[in-house]
Structures are given as structure tokens and as C-alpha cells.
Amino acid sequence: MVCYGIGFVLADSLRKKVRLMNVVEGSLAATIVVADDYFEWRGKVREILNQHPDWRIVGDASDGWEAVERASSPQPDIIILDIGLPQMNGIDAARLIRKNCPQTKIVFLSQQTDRDVIEAALAAGGTAFVLKSSAARDLPIAMVSALHAAPVAIPSWPPN
């Protein structure tokens, strides 16, 4: 399995190293905002994130404008953005978040599998892109990578 990132390819060995970093070094503390228009999906993301005691969810958003607002206050370490947000899509929201809160890492979590969309999301300031279908496995890896400021893997391509 190969994972793609911005301008580089990461092999499974790096994914395993990132997973090992999480187990050996422990998760870095992080504040997180979750932005998705489906309440149920935000709940699923909360379940995944709550497995990591050092990660604290400080807000959520159901549309793009709300995501930009939540990123400005309380200025989380990471914002998890869906691409298909109403009012303003996640890619446009990421551009504003990157401009207004450059220290906040942006992790995209979407069901989009179109290569151009993924590249646009990363170009808009995304630190990582994770498919919703692999969120339970890949979201924690992307979060740790983002917190360690390491090259960030996105899901295997093509998606399963």
C-alpha cells in the first residue's frame, strides 16, 4: 500500500512508524474543532478522538463560515474539515483559516476520492486528507503526523 502526500510518496513503513510514535511517545496534547454538516458524523469523529486522552475537542461547526469562526476562537491546534460543508465549502474555509490562523493545522476528512479535489484541499492549506471510510484507522495517524509536523500521509490510493 502506498500513501500520497504533497509532492511525496510514503510507504507503509512510515505509516507504521507514525503509528508507533503514537504508541511509544504518546499523543501530543491538542485542542481540536470538528467541522462537518452531519451531526451523526461529528459524533463518530468525537468517538475516534476521545480514544486519545490528550486530545480535547473545544468546538464543532456544521458549515464553512462556522468553521472559520471556530478556528479564530479558541484557535485550536487542529481543525478537522469536511469538504462538502454548506454555506462555504471546506476548501474555501481552509484558505481563510490558513490566512487568519496560520498555526492551526487543517486535517480534511471527506468522502471525496477525486484526485483533483484532494490536491486542491492540500493546496488550500490542508496538512492531511483522510477518507471517511478509513477514518477510524487513518485519522489518528494523520493527527499525530500533523502534531509532530511530520510529512502527512493521506489514505492509500486508490481508495479501498
Image (cartoon, rainbow, N blue to C red):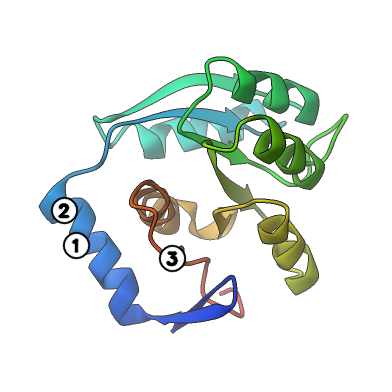
User: Residue 72, image x and y in percent?
Assistant: 63, 20
Q: Secondary structure at mark 2?
A: helix
On the image, numbered disc 2 is attached to which residue? 23
On the image, numbered disc 1 is attached to which residue? 20
User: Residue 14, image x and y in percent?
Assistant: 32, 75
Between 152 and 86, the one lying in front of the other is 152
Kindly identify the amino acid type of the residue bearing the numbered disc 1. Leu
Kindly identify the amino acid type of the residue bearing the numbered disc 3. Pro
Frontmost of labels 1 and 3 is 3
Disc 2 versus disc 3: distance between alpha carbons?
Answer: 18 Å
Q: Residues within 10 Å of mark 3 (few under 14, many from 20)?
A: some
Circles 1 and 2, Cβ within 8 Å, touching? The answer is: yes
Residue 26 vs residue 118: left or right? Answer: left
Tell me the residue at 47%/67% (across/down): 153
Quarter of image, res 119: bottom right
Residue 159 vs residue 67: left or right? Answer: left
Looking at the rendered image, the quarter that the C terminus falls into is bottom right
Q: Residues within 10 Å of mark 1 (few under 14, many from 20)?
A: few
Disc 1 versus disc 3: distance between alpha carbons?
Answer: 15 Å
On the image, numbered disc 3 is attached to which residue? 151
Kindly identify the amino acid type of the residue bearing the numbered disc 2. Val
N-terminal of the pair, mark 1 or mark 3, is: 1
